[in-house]
Image: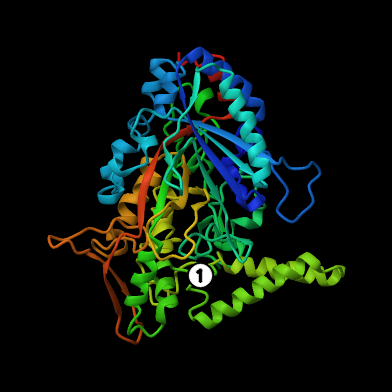
Amino acid sequence: MSYIDLNDIQGNVVKPYGRFGYPVARYFFLVFTDAVGAQRWLNTMIPHITTGAPWPEPGTPAEVPLPDTTLNIAFTYQGMKALGLPRKTLSAFPEEYQMGMKARADILGDDGPSHPQNWDPLWQDGPVHAWMSMNARSLEHMERQCDWLLTSIAQTLGDVVLRDGQRSPDGSLKPWQDAAALKENGRLVPKEHFGFVDGISDPYFKGCGSPPEHVIGEGKPTRGDPATMAGWEPLETGEFILGYRDEACEYPYAPVPMTLARNGTFMVYRKLHQNVASWRDYTAKAAEGYAGAQEKLEAKMVGRWHNGAPLCEFPTQAEADAFGTRLMTVRAELKTEKDPERLKALQKEYAAMRLKLKAFNYDDDLDGAACPLGAHVRRANPRGALEFGNEGAFQTKGALANRRRILRRGLPYGESPDGTTDDGEHGIIFMALNANIERQFEFVQQQWVNYGNDFKLSNERDPVLGNQQLDAQGQSTGHFMIPGGDSPPHFCTRIPRFVETRGGDYFFIPSVSALHLIAKGLVDPT
């Protein structure tokens, strides 16, 4: 097990805050007009940065109360320049980070309605130098901490400026981006706007601080039983954090000096609008004549049922519904049960049910009869399916899927109350953390989301996220096949674009010690 100093790593790298009880978030974007003044302000922020120091698992008592809000910071390449980093250090950053997301639009498939010219004004009118995030236990906590941050920025007298230009639901432009867990019947739910449970698992890597049993379904597959720890191993730390060995037994490419890079990582920030009305209208019509009806067709496109149950483990809706109902019942009983023995039994049952959401692979479904080869979750995380049948594939240093994993962060934003229109401001704030943006996030986006060759699907795109193209008559060329097993397959054609990019950029998340170097102007690449 490799050792990493979690106290030196920013908390958002190893903690999906929503899972720890922080359902609201606010993202701020800053510009630095004076390097010295910005360094001075940054120095005042460092004591408030939330680190990766381990927190107790949700539902277990904490010896020290957790904070009401969290705070983290990251910088674009232009931001690093504005902070006065040496030229040698700046030139050592990876090319894709230096270029920024807008300049990589062609690689990412950000065309048509996702083209940068259609992004929020924030990303079109002037630079963005820094991203700051707050996650909070409640909106009241958020507002209080927001006032503190705005006061600190105002006290710089213009050396640090809060950018506006983010479209809000009422059409106005706001100086920050709000995001929050959605509600159903007044209750917070871990779903996105298409109605699917999201954020079920995250890559497990050496030294991440999570309990060892979390490796099941979240590590890299070994071909052992996927329902046990024998079926998984932790990914190498260097896939996600700079300064450590990666899956190629090498140290990931990093800027100099190493004191700046070590314990840092790169972040992709994307504001993704969801066309909820188009999704519902299309899947309703595409399900006409399909034996499984609309909910099953949507599940085939996503790879999971609405309640998160994976198709490989729960092939019918009845099985998925029964599982979901029991999961909710157990969860509710856990909150009220007083009898120690009964409570212990419920905890054991709940842990086993949670495992069913992620402790699986596709070894028994190589033809996609249960979960189609082109389904969204199978593309995003093939769970070793691409290497199956290739002799020695797992002995190679470049085992395909293990080098394409990304840490997912973010929350939904906006509301789509009735789902009758695509208009408005609602979607997902998507953040991907990885040691190499080009090898990990960009590869997944370009080759697995917007192309299908690795899955032997030619030019078929991800049916949910793909940038479906138009033919000469203006008709969508998007298509998706649902294998029928012993029955004829079902073909979905003319799939529209359900998700559109509204802005984003590439950021570097320094370690806490690196923040001190930057704030004191002590970054020395010599």
Q: Where is residue 189 shown, x and y percent of the image? A: 59, 61
Q: Horizontal placement of 441 versus 257: left or right? A: left
Q: Give the residue displayed 33% in from the left and 34% down from the top.
A: 124
Asked if residue 5 can be seen in this view, the reply is: no
Q: Nearer the viewer, residue 374 or 252?
A: 374
Q: Where is residue 480 shown, x and y percent of the image? A: 30, 69
Relative to 276, residue 483 above or below: below
Q: Residue furthest left?
A: 472
Residue topped by disc 1: 306
Quadrant of res 70: top right
Asked if residue 405 can be seen in this view, the reply is: yes
Relative to 98, residue 207 above or below: below
Q: Give the residue displayed 58% in from the left and 68% down from the top.
A: 227
Q: Nearer the viewer, residue 208 or 193?
A: 193
Q: Quadrant of the C terminus?
A: top left
Q: Quadrant of the N terminus?
A: top right
Q: Give the residue displayed 76% in from the left and 70% down from the top.
A: 333
Amino acid, disc 1: His
